[in-house]
Amino acid sequence: MQQAATKTFNHKARRLLLIFFGMILCVLIISAFYISFNYQRLTLSLANHFLQPYQIELKQLNIKPLSLTHWLAPQVSLTVNGSDIKITELEVALLPETKLLALGIDDLQSLSAKNVDVQLSPNILRQSTASSDVSNPTIALDFAALPEIEIEQTQFTLKGIAAEKLTMSLSKLTLDKSGHFNSEIDHNNASVFSLDAQLSSSLWQAKTQINFNELQALTANIYSAESQLFPTNSSIAAENAPHTNSLLAPLYQLQETLRSQQINLSGHLDSTVSLALKSGQLQSTHKLSQFSVELKSLAALTLAPSTLIDKSSQINNKPKPLPLKPIPNDSIQSLVFAVNGHIADLQLRVQPFELVVAPSQQQMTEILHRLNDSPFENALSNLYKVMSFKDEQANVITPQLRIAVNSPIDYKLQDKSISTKLMSINLLQSKLAINVDISNINYSVLPQDTQHKNDFQAAFNWKIQANHQQNILLNSLWPTLTALPYDIAIDNAAIKLHGIFTAAVTDGKPSYSVNIGPQALQLTQGVSLSNNAYNIPAAMPRVNASIKKTELELVTAAEYHFEKGETTLTIPEIRYKLEDALLTQQYRDSQKTHYQMKVGSALVALQNPTTLTMTPAKSQTLANQLLHQTLSNQLNWSLDQVELDKSTVIFSAKKKRKVDKKLLHLAQVNLTQSIQLKTAKLYTEEDWWINDINLSSQHTYSPKNSQLNRFNLEGDWQFNNEFEPIIAFLSQTKSLPDSIVLNGNTALDVHYQLKQDNDTQFLLTFEPNVTNIEGSFANLPFEGGSLNTQCSYQWQRELNKNSSSFKCDNIELILQAFNPGVLITDIAAEATLSFSTDSSLSTASISTDEANHLALPAEIFGVKQASVRLTAKGDLLDGQLLIPQFKLSLKKPSSAYFVLQHINLEKLLEIQPQVGIYADGIFDGVLPITIENGKAEVKGGQLAARQPGGLIAVSGNPAVDQMRLSQPYLEFAFSALEHLEYSQLSSSFDMNTLGDAILKVNVKGRSRGIERPIHLNYSQEENMLQLLRSLQIGDNLQNQIENSIQQQ
């Protein structure tokens, strides 16, 4: 019973179990049928459930399983952040070991699609306004785990914008298992961006190309589309800040900047990039090919850089002659640069390149118009035309500017430092060729803090070479120079300079230094200066000058340094040399006097460098700071073969002849000048050599309260030399008569003082001392002479009035002997000389003739008073010649007295003995002379014999014997003169200003053989010129006396 019950329970259990499994099987079969008919809807629902956090929604998904691991989706539609995506023929391949119940992205083997159409949401172009703290889930992307991807064509359009207005395509997007990634962005069937990359877990490598022309066109279309989709409410706001909320705003701003400046970029950028992921090292090379910048606002001026060969090794090469024509090279229109280094410390290197600019006349006009200064624009435009030249076919060649970076430029992004070894700037195709080399350029930003963000330091070496080989008229270079009365032309010139420039800002304080290295040279050849015929009156003389060569050399370095508000200027040792200079002054009228000056060579040299230090103290002017420097130096001056000639046409006897006269001839002039500045005073000492004449001088300049126009200037001159070099110097210029012979020594001490304040005062004193005077004048010898005096000159200007005075006191002249035909010994003379002037004196009473002949013209100086006082004595014929008083006055008649004392008549006849004539006796006499208006007159001249008289004996004289025969009525007088013992002999002498003289002689005495007393009266009227001709004292003396009387 119990067993039966057990069997019944087991039977029921089996039946219930079969029923349960049958029900489950029915549910599975029904579920399988349901899923088979609704899998697409279920798949979309399940996928959207997982993609919802990523704002992705599948709209359509058709799947055709080709196998468990290979699926085909003929059509897939989805929406990503509002953008619609349609994928055609999407194939998905899974790895063979894929577990369907645990499917992940790592199980994907490949993805491929024939076509992808993307309609982008307009909001994709706008910046998100959501808080940066809120983020959506992201998908971690591991390139090593990515499947192979191949998309034939991807088309991008923008919702709300017609496809013909904006379409962009992504062609042939591929990614294989080896990490090779390739794609290309096209616009208007032209490539904008292409990428060919090799990606691995440790190294990324890529090659890219960007087409600037298509990029600008694409950017413009996107901007236009965005402007249509998001119109601004205010046109003003749109103009000032267009699409500030746009994701592409920086690109739009760049595009707008280029458009507003009318700049057009063209060319393409080819790049090769390599990034080591583990070390973070980046290596990249970039090449701008066919790259150019077109400046439409400058008449389409185009800038196109070209790659060069690295020439940094040629920095120290010797300079070559500067070319006028373009430098030939094998450069290609491209620009190559690289970005290398760790991604946290990148370095940009730009390879050598050049930029050549040859603006046309129209382009140059547009460039100059930017100066907004019409006169300056016209001046530079004129200079541009002058610098142009013509080729052999008479074509105008305009100047060309070449900027060449001859070595790589390195820029460190982290340090913000830049450096390069060599760059140059050349001006070519111009009358003036210029080459500027800049080497060892370094710029770096110093470690910064919050207070000093602009600290930096920079340095570079520089070299400038310039020359021109064609004649240039300086007046044509600049408009203001055309107004000069002279035309200045230079055949050729050259300059060579080199140095160092440094600049820095440290703790916000700037400092900089400009250094010019030694042996800097400026050379000029063929300088000419001539009167501009259009700017001078016909009556004015024509002045012409020429210089064969000038040379300026900086022997040592010059430097300008500024640091911590202090300026230091180093003036170098300088040499300036001039050769073969000629200056002429000629009138159009050949009958006038012409002058010509020549200088064989000239040299000025500053012996030592000089350093000046100045501070920006507001209380001190620049002049004050200069004066308070302490410095010393020496200047050397040299002149060789200086000649000044005068030519005059003289008419005589209906003939004319040209007379040339040398006014000055300096064989050599040397000056050594020592300069010292100390305690606001300037001291100088000079040593002069003029031919063989030596002088020395000292000067002191003391400004008042550091005002340069208020000062005290004083100095001294010393001269001590023999007469021989002085006479030689004066004789070569025919400044002295040929008949003068002079020897001796002369010394001269001069002191002067000039005070300039509210008025001007000038004081000059000099003390000449002449000794051992000997020589002759017109064959009249003299010897044993000396001259000493003290002279002073004062000049003062007050307001509009000038006054001056000159005087020489105690002029002492001594001659041991002078023989003008009669020997005069022990001559001693004392004199005083003085004159004064007053500019307020009326000149109406001064005649034109007087004004033209005054040594100091009255119409200029206003001569008020002039006088000369003289006393002299000398031994003559056992007696004396005295001048007790001689007073010469300019405004009043002057008087003089010549006194003869104890003159031995017998000694006089011994000088010029006459046959048959004897006379003796002692005489005294006086000749009063009056001088007025430059004319001399003698009134009341007397000569008388001293008691007891003397003897006159005339016998056997041929002239007297002839007169006795021809004039018998004078027989008694001649008989009385045969032996006349006179007791009284006197004569009177008068002469007018024309030289007509009356001589009256009275003789009283007794004659041998005649008992009664003899009384003879003789009167003779004779012109002194005729009388002097009868004297037998030499033709030269007679001519000199005649000339002197004629001048009076």
Image (cartoon, rainbow, N blue to C red):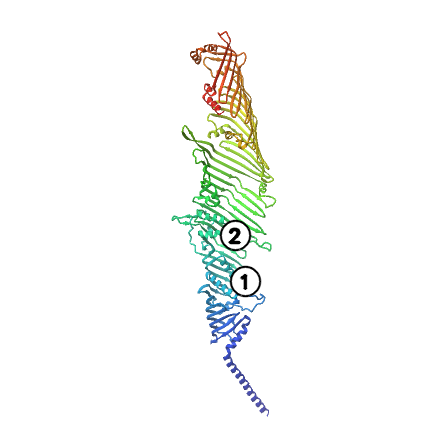
Assign a secondary structure to mark 2: strand
> Callout 2 environment at 10 Å: few (<14), some (14 to 19), or many (20+)?
some
* Residue 1026 point in image, percent of width and height: 46, 20
* Nearer the observer, 221 or 736: 221
> Callout 1 environment at 10 Å: few (<14), some (14 to 19), or many (20+)?
few
Image disc number at residue 442 = 2
* Residue 891 point in image, percent of width and height: 55, 27
The residue lying at 50 percent from left, 7 percent from top is 1012
* Nearer the observer, 905 or 96: 905
Apparent side of residue 634 relative to residue 492 in the rendered image (left or right)? right
Q: Is residue 950 above or below residue 200?
A: above
**Residue found at the far front of this picture:** 844
The residue mark sitting in front, 1 or 2, is: 1
**Residue found at the far bottom of this picture:** 1
Q: Quadrant of the N terminus?
A: bottom right
Q: Is residue 198 above or below residue 608?
A: below
From mark 1 to mark 2, how far is it between C-alphas? 48 Å
* Nearer the observer, 457 or 826: 826
The residue lying at 54 percent from left, 37 percent from top is 674
Residue 581 in sight:
no
**Residue found at the far left of this picture:** 393
Tag 1: amino acid = Ser
* Residue 854 point in image, percent of width and height: 52, 29
- Which residue position holds label 1? 234
Residue 953 in sight:
yes
Apparent side of residue 143 relative to residue 678 in the rendered image (left or right)? left
Assign a secondary structure to mark 1: loop
Apparent side of residue 318 relative to residue 561 in the rendered image (left or right)? left
